[in-house]
Amino acid sequence: MITIKDAVFLKSAPSMNETVAEGVSEVAFIGRSNVGKSSIINALTKRKGLAKSSSTPGKTRLINFFDIKFSYLENEYVARFVDLPGFGYAKVSKSLKYEWQKNLTEFIKKRSSIRLFVHLIDARHPKLEIDRDVNDFLHSIRRDDQQILNIFTKADKLKQKDVSALKKIYPNALLVSSSSGKGVEKATEAIFKSLFGEPN
Ligand code: GTP
Ligand code: MG
């Protein structure tokens, strides 16, 4: 089984210019504010409180880096998770909001160590315009060595009939509940395979 055996906080950076040196393969968690980006990092790494989450949208305001060690059989695989601010919400002035979103898109565009964009979508609201925008944006800036993986969050809030409806539209949908841990193993595996390919 593929697992995450180590996860440590590395750094919070207020802007593109103050981030950590590139090199290690990075996974950027992207999505609208409050969708569960920080929570899924805690669920994947099984470390509560590693990434700061909150019911108030706009909690994550910095670019947060975590050193991650995956393990499969006897081998270790090193990566980095990046927890980012959300799209679309900020209880601040318009100009400051513009500044933040510019910082965020700039980072996503220019950071060449990013190998995988994990686009998180609220499973209860899979068709929001903001997610279509995020999807279009990611596809427009993606380089050949970068992949995009969609993960639906807050799966515990769905009724069985909603799960079936979602799976009809997205047969291979990865559904995760960060609160119960359901779907976390499959998501870990999907992230690992996007980064390192099929383990042998
Ligand atoms: P920003 O940093 O503000 O952009 O938000 P975020 O995307 O990092 O969301 P965060 O992880 O802080 O979670 C937002 C809220 O949703 C918190 O109250 C979490 O407890 C809740 N939440 C996150 N994931 C789940 C989940 O799988 N199930 C349920 N029920 N609640 C969740
Ligand atoms: Mg957050």
Image: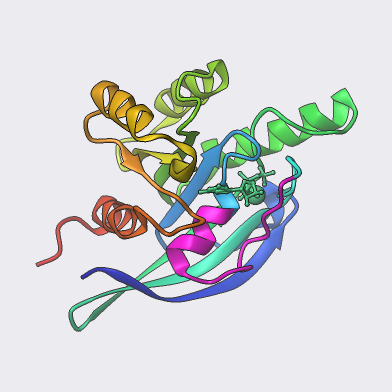
Q: Residue furthest bottom?
A: 74
Nearest the viewer among 17 and 7 is: 7
**Does residue 47 appear anywhere in the picture?**
yes
Q: Position of residue 74 (x, y in %)?
A: 19, 84
Q: Residue at x 64, y 68 (%)?
A: 49
The N terminus: image quadrant: bottom left
Nearest the viewer among 33 and 105 is: 33
**Residue 153 vertical placement versus 14 (above, below):** above
Instruction: Determine which quarter of the picture holds residue 89.
Output: top right
Colour mapping: rainbow
Nearest the viewer among 12 and 54 is: 54
Instruction: Determine which quarter of the picture holds residue 140.
Output: top left
Instruction: Determine which quarter of the picture holds residue 35.
Output: top right
Which residues are drawn in magenta?
Answer: 39-55
The C terminus: image quadrant: bottom left
**Does residue 22 appear anywhere in the picture?**
no
